[in-house]
Amino acid sequence: MDRVIIFDTTLRDGEQSAGAALNIDEKLEIARQLERLKVDVIEAGFPISSPGDLEAVRRIAKEVRGPTICALAHANKEAVDAAWQAIKDAQHPCIHVFLSSSEIHMAHQLKKSREQVLEAALNMVARAKGYLEDIEFSPMDATRTDPAFLYQIIEATIAAGATTVNIPDTVGYTIPREFCALIEGIFKNVPNINKAVVSVHCHNDLGLAVANSLAVLDYGVRQIECTVNGIGERAGNASLEEIVMALRTRKDLFKYTTDIDTLQIHKTSRLVSDLTGMSVQPNKAIVGANAFRHESGIHQDGILKERATYEIMDPRDIGLTGTTLTLGKLSGRHAFKARLEVLGYTLSDEEFARAFTAFKELADKKKEISDRDIEALIAEEMRTFSETYHLDHVQVSCGDHLVPTASVRLIGPGGQLLADAALGTGPVDAVYKAINRLVSVPNNLTEFSVKSVTAGIDAMGEVTIRIESGGRTYTGRGAATDIIVASAKAYMNALNRLLSAMQKA
């Protein structure tokens, strides 16, 4: 079976999702999980875009071994040089040069002729080649590019040193049969195409990113660029988990394999969702909450008799446990630690002590604690592990004949205790106003959503918010059995991210 290279761009294209900004430590945490997932290539970022992104890529290149670490650069000297500075310490470094090639991009965005675009592509691929061997080139908006010019720029960049040529469907415009014809034309009309790996990078504007990526494998493509949970610009990218599990599930049609450790898929999906604040829709294929849930009586009857009647995949193959074991207030440290190990969490002694304390507090409020509760709890603890301000206490009074009032106490820098109170139009508004009196950072709340982690009256609630400050969006998440407390935690999480960005700036 031919092997398909999985090129993960969660940390680059995925982070470009509106409101999905990650700090350096969060990017490093995701990169380490991608290493455990065994992706072949991690596109760690776009170093020229900001000093923070350059530093994040540099740390990933130094600390994450195994996968190729790739840095994106548009076709100019400064970007290529910054990419090299960021990844030069990687075990397997790669520079990914891109430049628009479609008429609409060249005329309206670049304001360059074909000749100028071709010259810039050649010069920058050659410049990157002077630093290292592994070079990828992408003619951006390839699916709307004149095929004759596309063949020309691909042939020229391979001759200049590109070892991978990526064909991006940048705006999610193509459909499978059209994309297959384009790839077939490239293999027929580019004489030196056998000297490079052919890759694809599909966006999901028409909901066809995964379909397009899979369709072209039979036409010679051997690398697929994708993201965890399919996040990315606009409607997102091809979803890594869908690509991998389609190849695994339909081996009768796809004679291809990957090196992905599918047991890490669920954990990776959850981590990316938690750190980016991008919730996974319940009906999302593979990793959605409903992907392996059965409501219909006919379906439930079939599953009880033979799982394969209504499940084409075993949930255990993506890291979901088949056990029904639940924990409660009588469960001890060993049982809790064993459950964490089953779920794939490895915590330091300090992290475990904090998590166990939080688990016991939750157990006093909930009779039974499920795996999803534990995942939400661990995510909450990781969010509060390094904060500028920590929520220490929140209390509200409200009702249909009361003015909503909130009192809040925070632990600030150096352990300083800060307390204040405020009135609001509702309990959450009052809490946020009290926090704003203590943490004086101008911002606008642009999004607020609440969901239940599990079913039941005692379920944990998970709040996701987005705030905007200085033209940038910051996401915050919080979880608790009390939705007001969860709302306060989410706001503090977003504010701490904003403060961290301000300190770095």
Image (cartoon, rainbow, N blue to C red):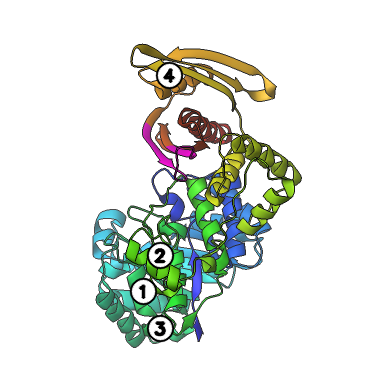
Q: Between label 4 and label 3, give the one nearer the viewer.
A: 4
Type of the residue with mark 3: Gly
* Segment colored magenta: 446-464
Q: Which residue is mark 2?
A: 120
Q: Residues within 10 Å of mark 3 (few under 14, many from 20)?
A: some
Residue 121 as seen in the image, left or right of residue 264: left
Q: Locate residue 74, reporting x and y percent.
A: 44, 58
Between marks 4 and 3, how big is the CA–CA gap? 59 Å
Residue at the disc numbered 3:
220
| Foreground residue among 247 and 335 | 335
Q: Which residue is mark 4?
A: 430
Closer to the chain start, of discs 4 and 2, is 2
Q: Earlier in the sequence, mark 4 or mark 1?
A: 1
- What is the C-alpha distance between the residues marked 4 and 2? 56 Å
Where is residue 1 shown, x and y percent of the image? 50, 87
**Secondary structure found at label 1:** helix
User: Residue at position x 69%, y 22% from top?
Assistant: 415
Name the amino acid type tagged 2.
Ala
Of mark 2 and mark 1, the one earlier in the sequence is 2
Pointer 3 or 1: first along the chain? 1
Query: What residue is rendered at 34% in x and 62% in y?
Result: 297
Between circles 4 and 2, the one closer to the viewer is 4
Q: Which mark is residue 153?
A: 1
